[in-house]
Image (cartoon, rainbow, N blue to C red):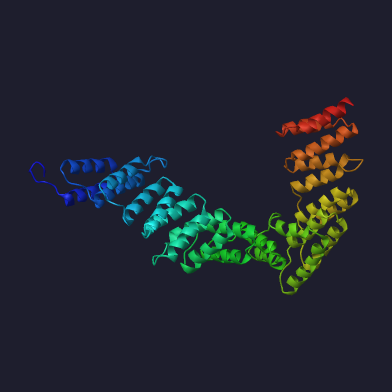
Amino acid sequence: MKREHVRPDLTIYNSLLACIAEEGLPLEARAVMDDMIAMGILPDRQSYHHVLHATTSYHDHFQASRWSPLEATWETLEKMADQGIPPNEQTYALIIKRITATEGIELALQFMHEMAKRGFTPDLTATQDVIKLAAHLNFPRLAIDITQNFEAHSVRRIDGETWMSCLVSSAESLYADGVQKCWEKAIHDMNLTPDEGTCIAVLHTCARHGLPDLATDVIRVLRSIGVDWQEYHFAPLLEAFSRVGKLKEAFGTLHLLRSNGIVPLPETTQPITDILKRDLDAVDGVWKILDELRDEGHTIDAAAVNTIIEASVALGDLQRAVGAYKAIREYTSKPDVETFNHLLQGCINAEHRELGDKLLLDLKQANVRPNALTYERTILLCLTQPTYEDAFFYLEEMKAQKIVPPLRVYEAIVRTCVAAGDSRYALALAELEQCGYSLSKDLQRHVATNRSS
């Protein structure tokens, strides 16, 4: 055009700036602006918007450092002010979009507040960018407050992706109120489908704050999206029931696990056990719940009775624990290895070797395979007696089963042998080192002190 002596007008320049802005070329945009001014054409508001857009698009396309400077944006605003062009809604939207690209949440909020003072309605896209940024930075309460405030003063609605980001942020922060609000909005009102990771995060929040109804709904959604139920899906549900004192529903969850081919782990029932450990009245009250479930046709899982046994042992009532063990078969259930492990811990606490031997015999007759914890507690029980030769027998049997004895087993053997003047502590120390363990400083001092004495 210039070669043909055709003078470009404002429309031509703005069209050129629009193309440059779309490609994210801020340096070229500023060069065009300089050329405009050199040609005696003053940029208008749209021209400056294209320059702002070019800076924002540059960061979108090339993913520049999130802490890159904002000087170019401020320079553009200063030029607008020098020319007497006040910012409007679109100006603020472009500024906020640029700021959110650098994760400057405080500055973005400042400009949103400035918009409100000037009587401007926030742009939907810019508002959603700020909400997503707040959620990404683990400020779920802030993100939800902005979302609700926007929808309260606008006919436009925040999109599902933004609501889902608020849900994920709330769940990861264990923000119960936010999770409940966002789940209702995103899943029920907007009919969105969360992924399994989001569901698990929500379940963790339910477990922490005792939200069994929400946890139950999450379990339903998991099935609806084709996820196979696993133990780690039901463990938070059981904990949620336990936190609000719904023990019957918690024990019923164990039946649900078994009916779906899922084996509960010892950790699964820990929330129930923690409640029962508070006092013996709580332990005794469980039998009524189990009877009700049995009468309703539920299978009483061994894990349910194990909670009674573990709590009784923790409360120092070995007799009550043994009574619960004997009652297992009344509920058409069979003891498992965890049943015997809990009882062996009670025997250790009471130094009751005779009962421990009887339990080991029952274990063999029930064809229950001992695990590492079984051997560990059997060895520790033997070490509570004046004659502890069997501890070495079970140690060898443990190794014959290809089970590496834990450090605490060797430490207990060393302490017992040193205290009894038994030179076999040296063999235990040698094996300890062969297993790759390091002797604690406390045990080193104990060995050195007793050897010198």
Residue 451 in percent (x, y) is at: 86, 27
From the viewer's side, name the closer residue of 296 and 80.
80
Residue name at image x 80 percent, y 62 percent: 283
For residue 126, above or below residue 425: below
Residue 434 in percent (x, y) is at: 73, 32
For residue 62, above or below residue 184: above
For residue 452, above or below residue 45: above
From the viewer's side, name the closer residue of 342 and 165.
165
Question: The C terminus is located in which quarter?
Answer: top right
Residue name at image x 46 percent, y 58 percent: 146
For residue 10, above or below residue 424: below
Quarter of the figure with residue 402: top right
Residue 375 in percent (x, y) is at: 79, 46
Residue name at image x 46 percent, y 48 percent: 106
Residue 364 visible from this viewpoint: no
Residue 241 in percent (x, y) is at: 67, 64
Residue name at image x 19 percent, y 42 percent: 37
Residue 411 visible from this viewpoint: yes
Position of 298 with respect to 36 (left or right) is right
Position of 226 with respect to 407 (left or right) is left
Quarter of the figure with residue 128: bottom left
